[in-house]
Image: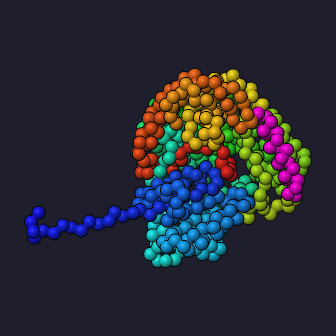
Amino acid sequence: MTSTQTEAPTQPPTVPRTYEVRTYGCQMNVHDSERLTGLLEDAGYAAAPSGEQADVVVFNTCAVRENADNRLYGNLGHLAPVKAATPGMQIAVGGCLAQKDRETITRKAPWVDVVFGTHNIGSLPVLLERARVQEEAQVEILESLEVFPSTLPTKRESAYAAWVSISVGCNNTCTFCIVPSLRGTEKDRRPGEILAEIEALVADGVSEVTLLGQNVNAYGVEFGDRQAFSKLLRACGDIEGLERVRFTSPHPAEFTDDVIEAMAQTPNVMPSLHMPLQSGSDKVLRAMRRSYRQSRYLGIIERVRAAMPEAAITTDIIVGFPGETDEDFEATLDVVRAARFSGAFTFQYSKRPGTPAATLEDQVPRAVVQERYERLVAEVNEIAWQENRALEGRRMDLLVAEGEGRKDAATHRLSGRAPDNRLVHFNPEGADGVRPGDVVTVEVTYGAPHHLVADGAVLSVRRTRSGDTWERRQGGAAPEAGGVSLGMPVIGVPSPLPEAPACR
């Protein structure tokens, strides 16, 4: 360097703003949060380290449960003094509750910077920047989905499992559910786009996908193919490397025999089925505008079991719907006993403003609802326990999971999912070096009400591409944030335990 040359000043590295996304609600909300994190990272934000306050906190909300509003405003209240003491911090609220309440959120919590709806989650980075520059809250709610959100960047946390949306919205008019009015009417993706996304996911190391829709088996209504869903299941069977296919959640009124046949005849479609019941009383089902009756529902269960004897069937049940009598409730218990569910998501009816059921007479007293609820839970748990005890001694192939066994550290066990989606905690003896995404064979030694235990040594281990992908990520490779160009968002580990059910 000559004496006349000067060295350019070194610019300090730019520290990215950090974010945290808090998700409440059903699979759709979790699904959308994967897109929100992808959008934020694509815009230059970074996930906040554990235990540190994020620069941007995003609430992705649910509007199904009665306490959804209170929960949101309580959390916003806790953040108000934090934001006041943190220059530049921003808070955004999206999801179903934002779609419903709109400006109410900024009126009750004026420290919120951005409110966005279910149809425009792609606007979040722009709205955050606009709120920062203009120094005022930005509220943007679209009334309908203008473009299927298939090109948004997505951050997928899991190396081995993914959601794949095949439709959004719902055409049903269940009187207890507000979701269709917030998510809009059903919009279907083209089969080629769905299969292209799945193939790309498999190429990225995924071995299990869960097809997702508000009413998943109504898929095809937009392009007039009543067997589109069963055809899609069969097409998934032709994707090399795709080991497990699941779906949630179907509607009994539109669950047809061609779907049962496709499930039974396609080897990688798993023998697990979530079939919402809601009530076993024909009278209550009619009041709910559920277009099926007890006999049809039990007929579906019977045909599924005939085609797939090993199938595990779970359900949703609402207790205390307006006008529900003791006789109506006993009819629900009758169905529970006949169907022998492996598990059930049980809910006490909660009045939601904006739904037809909210104005119905004969609201059931809270004490009666509570008593029925406790009886239902006891019945469901007893049957599930009996069903799980019947599996003792059975050998199962488990997809090793990450983060599903909350007590694994204390019990020195690992956890995995059986083909029927039952959670199994297993002794890792004989499985040295096994990774999430790998497959192990175990023998069940004990059936508990909500899980199985395999305390003997692992019988075999199959290392997989999914396990390889998981291992690479532990070496510092970040989860994909660019997403799949044709795809809806996917989440890390599809959970069988949603906080609240999607409309179905």
**Magenta-drawn segment:** 364-385
- In the rendered structure, the answer to whether residue 430 lies left or right of residue 1 reads right
Where is residue 354? Give x, y as percent.
Answer: 72, 64
Image quarter of residue 68: bottom right
Please say if 84 is above or below 43.
below
Please name the predominant secondary structure of the magenta segment in the image.
helix
Q: Which residue is nearer to you in this view: 92 or 29?
A: 92
- In the rendered structure, the answer to whether residue 479 lies left or right of residue 176 reads left
Q: Quadrant of the N terminus?
A: bottom left
Residue at 52% x, 77% y is 136
Q: Is residue 321 visible?
A: yes
Where is residue 206? Give x, y as percent.
Answer: 48, 38
Q: Can residue 219 be seen in this view?
A: no
Where is residue 21? Give x, y as percent.
Answer: 54, 58
- In the rendered structure, the answer to whether residue 3 lies left or right of residue 155 reads left
Q: Which residue is nearer to you in this view: 184 or 362?
A: 362
Image quarter of residue 244: top right
